[in-house]
Amino acid sequence: MSTEKPQLAGHSRFRQSTDQISSLITLSHSINVFSTRWKLIINKLNEVLPVLVGIQLEIQDSGENSTLSGLIEEFEETIEFTTKLAQKCIDQSYNGKLLMQSDLDIIFVKLNKQIQCLYEFKSFCCYSIVDSAIVVSKPGPNSSKDDVRFYVNDLVSRFKIGNNEMKKQALICFNEDERFLKIAMEIEGFGHVLIESLSINMEIQEEVLKSIDMICEFDEFIRILVSIGVIGSLIRVLGGGTYSSKCLSTRCLMKCTAECENAWSVSAHGGVTSLLRISASENDSSDELVGLACGVLKNLVGVYEIKRFIVEEGAITIFVNLVKSRNEVSQISAIEFLQAISFGDQKVADSIANEGGIRVLVHVLDPKLSFSSKTRERSIRAIMCLCSDLTGMDRLLSYGFMDHILYFLHNGDISVQEASLKAAFWLSGISDDIKKAMGEVGFLQELVKLVTAKSFEVREMAFSTLSNLVSNPRNRKRFVENDQNVSLLMQSIDQEEGTLCHKKLLLPIIMSLSGCNSGRKKILSSGYLKNIEKLADEEISDARKIVKNLSSNRFVRMVKGIWH
């Protein structure tokens, strides 16, 4: 014989439901098995409590409602069954793990569906009172914390239980000031409702993503959002959102993956495949989205296993082709990705070279082509990273890399010129053959011109590169053939603004030159030997060695005696 439940009315019915939920949440604290599934279920229960309270307040003057009674009854039945499952998990008296996992999954789906029905009912109730609702005034910049918190609480209520228009207006208000979102994130259930709105409410998806994007500016809130499933929801947007929504979603993913600890979550939800698909579908109207997708993938390659998967999925071919794109954003993003994925991994660097990546990057440096300075600067950096192994150097030079670097040392914008100078320094330290080749094509004269540059960093790099080059006997001879070269170096030591550090950078070059007869002659004929002697008196070791080289030559002593 079945027993019927006593029919409760009005507030008593709501009180019974909320009590059941609270008891179940308390009971769940004693559960030590299937923790992931129970966490999802409890999150749903925490979400529904404010919804029930909101419905209770809205219908308090409207009497009974048969639709609502049916919803509450179904919900109570689900709670009762869930409570029984909770008790079985506590006692570990369930019949098989797979069966219990299946039951918990079914409960989660039921709760999700029933909560959505309650939201829809609440939205219907709210719709009739939108026009007469009291709107809390937006607090000004000097408003008290209590006023701001009261305003935010009102916005959160409207967002949770309002219709689509109310939700959208609440989100627009949130997005006007990050203070409002920071306070909202401290209110229980707000994060859950925000994330859920991404998948169940397409009409406000873009505004929701703007809110999440702002929230992701704060590391402590990123951790909260990730823990309640934001990454999976963001990745789903990539498969079915508007272009603007996809851009916002990818920007949020880039912020979430700035720390490698969240990379696995992206991979687990199929995000790598989605991001690669976006990157491979580049066209003139998708440059922003492609750039953002590259940024997320660049964050992910910090995890070795994910990097291997990205490579296996054909990423190298995709990004080498992207460098050839006509769009600057896509070009730069692809170049930075190739540099990141090859960092410290010679096998990947070799794969990029075999796919034609080095040739494409050098092609970017061709002065006859119209690539931007920023793209060229990034290309130079990537080439130095990819070609750290000597085996690829012959191939790099055969593509004309050295000639392009020399051209931009003379003609490039400041950023490209500085990148070219770093590349020249890098080349000069690789092998004696490359030093010789650099001297032959004209690097010495271009580097001397930079000795008087305004930027100390540029002068420092020019001195260091010259020092490397003149260590080669042929380059020394070639350098001193021009009377002005040695004179300019000696004069630079005498400049009043030259710091001791500046002078120490010049001395290794002059010391190399003092190792040959023609160099010693040019040093003496410059008229600035006294500056070297002064530094020698100050116990500067390189200066003392230079003076020793000069004084050990009988011809030099004779010339010096004539001058004095």
Image (cartoon, grey):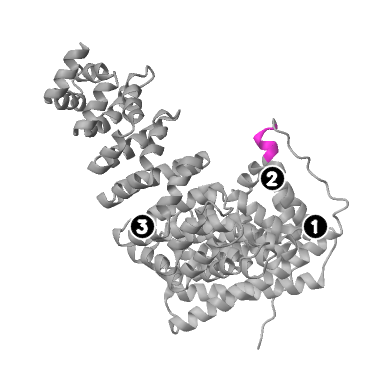
Amino acid type of the residue that numbered disc 2 sits on in the rendered structure = Val
Quarter of the rendering occupied by the N terminus = bottom right
Q: Nearer the viewer, residue 472 or 481?
A: 481
The residue under label 1 is: 165
The mark lying in front, picked from 1 and 2, is 1
The relative height of residue 114 versus residue 544 in the rendered view (above or below) is: below
Q: Residue at x 59, y 50 (%)?
A: 215
Whether residue 28 is visible to the viewer of this picture, yes or no, is: no
Amino acid type of the residue that numbered disc 1 sits on in the rendered structure = Glu
Q: Residue at x 38, y 53 (%)?
A: 384
Q: Nearer the viewer, residue 180 or 535?
A: 535
Tell me the element at label 2.
helix
* Circle number at residue 152: 2
Is 380 one of the magenta-colored residues? no
The mark lying in front, picked from 2 and 3, is 3
- How far separated are the C-alphas under marks 2 and 3? 55 Å
Mark 2 crowdedness (10 Å alpha carbons): few <14, some 14-19, many ≥20: many
The mark lying in front, picked from 3 and 1, is 3
In primary-sequence order, the first of circles 3 and 1 is 1
Amino acid type of the residue that numbered disc 3 sits on in the rendered structure = Cys
Mark 1 crowdedness (10 Å alpha carbons): few <14, some 14-19, many ≥20: some
Tell me the element at label 3.
loop
Magenta-colored span = 143-148
